[in-house]
């Protein structure tokens, strides 16, 4: 069920109305469970297509149940290995083609995020963080919550359980207005900005990927344009999707976690990952990076080795995150590039602190020249590393790199970094000037507020008619 | 274990891990207030605290700590 389809809107209206008919918690849980089942069924043309997913859920539930009975490391290890093997088999990773595959098409949408939810429950049950007994229906409502089914956000069961059918958000006129406004903002990002960027990306990218007689500088300019367009498309598509589901969540009494916090304002690559796809990066930090680093530091307790152990943990964590994103070798490269970015950033911080001292280094990072240089470098690195997502096949990826060469990649990197750094500086200056003008009286007025909302809806209709294209959600593929 | 005892012992651990003899802790102290308290040194700190107080922390406890006050409350509960 596409988020931009009339069917989704009808489905959503029916779920919201049904949810608010009664305040009974069991009734509301029934409505949410039924909504999840209907949402999943919309992706099926045959009932057999859902069987592998149901088997995966069954295995996850059995593993959690076994951990309730015996909270031993052995049971946890056996459960994690079984779940991961099942996941790798069902996702048809190209590295494991020899394992064979099921002889019929089946549903894989949502599988990646269900994996995170199941693993989190298993680890938390084992550690004693999750003591509540989870029934099979609550397990289904959590793992297959239709708002988070396609691509998160990744909630913790403890947070979900506190709101499950209980209308944790008290609905009144201003809350409903804010929810619809957020949904409209999401569609503006999704249908206007991301779709336009995708339109331009689809138009320009073939010129880059096919042999042409471009001069060196033109080739770099085209690469910088294509890579930037894809980043704009990815961010607005994904963050627009999040605005939509978080807004709908409010109407259903749920507070879903945020996934983005102005990532392009990050002053370092490490900070960027605290602001981009936050629930995913936090999951990896909690359940892979931190435990891995603890093991490494227990084995090698010398403080002088901290940074090097951190580098190793960054490479492993981002490597696994890269493999999770896709099933080809290019996604491993993506993970390694992200690991390299985080490692370079950490080693730079350590080297600067040692050379300048903590106070002088902190003063340096507060200077305007440093801030905008760091913002430019951070975004440029991320923009170019994302090439792995839009050229996911290894032969095409290596062909592109061969055409650009080291000089081409380096030149494009500098161009994007300088362009973004200058753009960010100009934007900040303009925003600071605008803040001096007190527009709160106009912006907060009832007419202006509603006019703004109506304007968003009008713009959506106008641009959607112009583009003749219903955009799909990019992260659904991961 | 009394809260004052927790803070006294915790301050000594912080001073040792971050190599700052004059480091003073309050419940509101966060990673932003202590030079060098980042995601890597946080893990070294957790290991040192675990050893000093003889307690263990779960993955979500380690990840969800917001300030020294929460850390001290958690230790007080476990020790």
Image (cartoon, coloured by chain):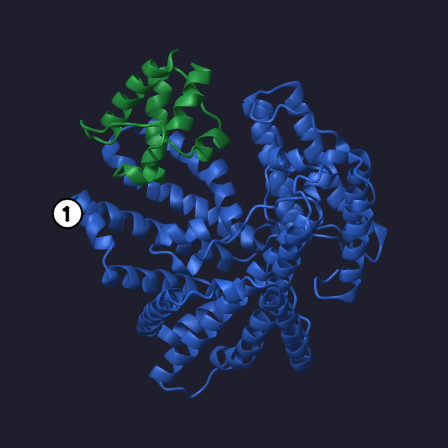
- Above or below residue A145? Residue A222 is below
Q: Which residue is mark 1?
A: A355
Q: Horizontal placement of A149 versus A406: left or right? A: right
> Can residue A397 be seen from the camera position used here?
yes
The location of residue A230, given as percent across then percent down, is: 50, 69
The location of residue A3, given as percent across then percent down, is: 70, 62
Identify by letter the chain in green. B
* Quadrant that contains the N terminus of chain B: top left
Which sits in the foreground, A279 or A435?
A435
Residue at 24 percent of width and 45 percent of height: A350
**Colour in which chain A is drawn:** blue
Residue at 33 percent of width and 37 percent of height: B31
Q: Indicate the quadrant where residue A14 lies.
A: bottom right
> Can residue A99 be seen from the camera position used here?
no
The location of residue A83, given as percent across then percent down, is: 63, 37
Q: Horizontal placement of A311 versus A228: left or right? A: left
Residue at 66 percent of width and 66 percent of height: A472
């Amino acid at each position: 069920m596409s988020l931009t389809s009339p069917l989704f809107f009808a489905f959503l209206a029916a779920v919201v109305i049904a949810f608010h008919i009664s305040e009974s918690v069991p009734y509301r849980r029934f409505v949410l469970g039924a909504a999840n089942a209907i949402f999943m069924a919309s992706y099926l043309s045959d009932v057999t297509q859902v069987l592998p997913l149901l088997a995966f859920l069954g295995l996850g539930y059995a593993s959690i149940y076994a951990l309730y009975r015996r909270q031993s490391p052995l049971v946890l290890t056996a459960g994690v290995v079984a779940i991961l093997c099942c996941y790798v088999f069902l996702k048809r990773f190209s590295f494991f083609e020899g394992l064979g595959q099921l002889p019929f098409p089946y549903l894989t949408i949502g599988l990646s995020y269900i994996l995170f939810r199941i693993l989190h429950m298993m680890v938390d049950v084992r550690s004693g963080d999750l003591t509540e007994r989870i029934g099979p229906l609550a397990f289904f409502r959590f793992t297959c919550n239709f708002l988070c089914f396609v691509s998160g956000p990744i909630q913790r069961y403890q947070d979900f359980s506190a709101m499950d059918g209980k209308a944790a958000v008290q609905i009144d006129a201003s809350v409903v207005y804010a929810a619809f406004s957020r949904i409209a903002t999401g569609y503006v990002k999704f249908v206007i900005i991301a779709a336009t960027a995708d339109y331009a990306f689809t138009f320009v990218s073939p010129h880059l990927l096919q042999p042409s007689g471009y001069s060196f500088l033109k080739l770099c300019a085209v690469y910088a344009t294509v890579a930037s367009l894809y980043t704009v498309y990815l961010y607005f598509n994904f963050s627009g999707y999040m605005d939509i589901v978080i807004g709908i969540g409010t109407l259903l009494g749920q507070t879903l976690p945020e996934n983005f916090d102005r990532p392009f304002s990050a002053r370092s690559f490490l900070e960027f990952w605290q602001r981009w796809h936050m629930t995913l990066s936090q999951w990896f930090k909690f359940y892979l990076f931190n435990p891995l680093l603890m093991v490494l530091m227990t084995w090698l307790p010398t403080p002088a080795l901290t940074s090097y152990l951190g580098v190793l943990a960054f490479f492993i964590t981002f490597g696994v995150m890269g493999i999770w994103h896709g099933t080809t070798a290019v996604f491993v490269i993506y993970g390694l590039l992200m690991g390299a970015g985080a490692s370079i950033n950490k080693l730079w911080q350590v080297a600067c602190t040692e050379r300048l001292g903590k106070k002088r280094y902190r003063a340096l990072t507060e200077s305007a020249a440093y801030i905008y240089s760091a913002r430019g470098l951070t975004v440029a690195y991320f923009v170019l590393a994302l090439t792995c997502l839009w050229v996911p096949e290894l032969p095409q990826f290596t062909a592109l790199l061969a055409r650009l060469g080291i000089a081409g990649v380096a030149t494009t990197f500098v161009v994007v970094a300088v362009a973004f750094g200058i753009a960010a500086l100009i934007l900040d200056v303009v925003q600071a000037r605008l803040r001096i003008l007190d527009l709160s009286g106009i912006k907060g007025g009832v007419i202006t507020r509603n006019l703004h909302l109506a304007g968003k809806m009008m713009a959506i209709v106008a641009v959607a008619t112009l583009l003749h294209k219903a955009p799909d959600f990019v992260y659904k593929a991961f | 274990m009394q809260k004052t005892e927790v803070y006294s012992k915790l301050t000594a651990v912080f001073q040792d891990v971050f190599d700052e003899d004059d480091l003073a802790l309050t419940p509101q102290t966060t990673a932003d207030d202590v030079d060098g308290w980042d995601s890597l040194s946080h893990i070294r700190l957790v290991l040192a605290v675990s050893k000093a107080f003889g307690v263990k922390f779960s993955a979500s406890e380690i990840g969800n700590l917001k300030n020294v006050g929460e850390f001290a409350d958690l230790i007080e509960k476990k020790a």
